[in-house]
Image (cartoon, rainbow, N blue to C red):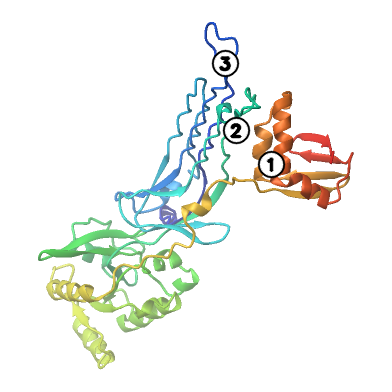
Amino acid sequence: MAAQTNFIDIATIWLHAGKGGDGAVSFHREKFVAAGGPDGGDGGKGGDIVFVADPGMHTLLDFRFNRKFYAEAGQTGGPARSNGKSGQDLIIKVPAGTLIRDMNTGKVIADIQEVGVPRVVLHGGRGGWGNSHFATPTRQAPNFAKPGVRTEIFDVQLELKTIADVGLVGFPNVGKSTILSVLTAAKPKIANYHFTTLLPNLGVVKAHSDGFVLADIPGLIEGASEGAGLGHEFLRHVERTRLLLHVLDISGCEGRDPLEDLDIINNELAKYKELSKKPQLIVCNKMDMDGAQENLERLQKKLEGTGTEIFPVSAATVQGFAPLVNRCMELLRELPPIESFEEESGADEFKPAQGESFIVRRENDWFVVEGPGVDGLMQRINMDDAESMAYFERTLRRMGVIDELRAKGATDGDNVRMGDVEFEFIN
């Protein structure tokens, strides 16, 4: 069944928000002014990674081959205090019901449910300051600026869990797709073979002045909770539904016993996060066929006293659906809303590394200083400028780098490496 490869409801992608633009080193120049002051502008902010639910998408197939996403970097600052333009945000469209997880921790970053509502998942880097910010009464011509904040790459997993009030469940070929087409304006692919439905189909059932969303979910088989057949691709789409319509081929026309089918399906639901505890109505389809009435009576006897409600219908002749729809409406008024998954990590936790953090470690005869704080400092230092180097030394002392080197055992003349720069330690 090669066609199953078109069903994609899990995808791994990586995201790279835009780097912040670098600040500019510039000095005011005009006629008759020999040496103007610093006027370098700030860099622009990097673009954010934004997700939004698209009503026209029902699968993650678009992410099967397109897995790398970059937002635009901020532009570098210019002279005359001209700030760089911010990078453009990258909008990524996904189906409603998509969970975004951090691949490293497994935590849910975002649950994209509302159609058209943008969610920032990864922030772009902050733009760097131009040299105009570093002018002081004693340092009137700073020949350095601050770089934009660099951004990191994050691996995330997209997992689609269909959003629907009511889900149609049951073995393949019991008539779920036909029932969906009868009750809604949806036009699912329907044919007389197993696994015709390879992705959830959604439709809106309109009843009186109200209605609900109905999902025809891919057919289930025995062993699905262990991954057989469409397995978890089926079961994860049941998680959000508020009510299940368990469809049986009550005629047994394919040689299966509908009573056994009922037990098998419920057993698989029970093994996967106790889905069998969801409210359930039994829909006995194909009542127009031979053997249906006898099997219905057997089912009624089997379920007698359990409180389970049974609705005989025929999708082929469009009979018996009014009582079913009315009962669905009654139950949905009482049931809690569609489940949302708790977001364990917000976009704030995925901001680019910044600040003055650093570590000092020993590597053979070298003391190595590294970390976001040191990396940012090294980018904005002009090693050929005396004022810049004086600023570099003062900043190292203020950050505590000199004290930490001394605590790690560094003495005068020891070798120190920061990024690509090597020098001797002088206490």
| Residue in the picture at 36% in, 80% down | 277
Assign the N terminus to one quadrant of the image: bottom left
Q: Is residue 222 visible?
A: yes
In the rendering, which numbered label is found on residue 114? none
- The amino acid at mark 3 is Gly
Quick one: label 1, few (<14), some, or many (20+) residues within 10 Å? many
Q: Position of residue 228 (x, y in %)?
A: 47, 69
Amino acid identity at mark 2: Lys
Residue 37: percent from the left, percent from the top?
Answer: 57, 19
Please state which of the two labelled residues, at mark 3 or mark 1, is closer to the viewer: 3
The residue indicated by pointer 3 is: 36
- Outermost residue on the left side: it is 208
Which quadrant would residue 91 be assigned to in this image? Answer: top left
Q: Of 56 and 97, which appears nearest the observer? A: 97
The disc label shown at residue 146, or none? 2
Q: Identify the mark nearer the N-term, 3 or 1.
A: 3
Question: Who is closer to the viewer here, 105 or 358?
Answer: 358
From the viewer's perspective, tell me whether residue 379 is left or right of residue 207. Answer: right
Element at label 3: loop
Q: Position of residue 306 (x, y in %)?
A: 28, 90
Label 1 belongs to which residue?
Answer: 374
Q: Residue at x 29, y 59 (%)?
A: 201
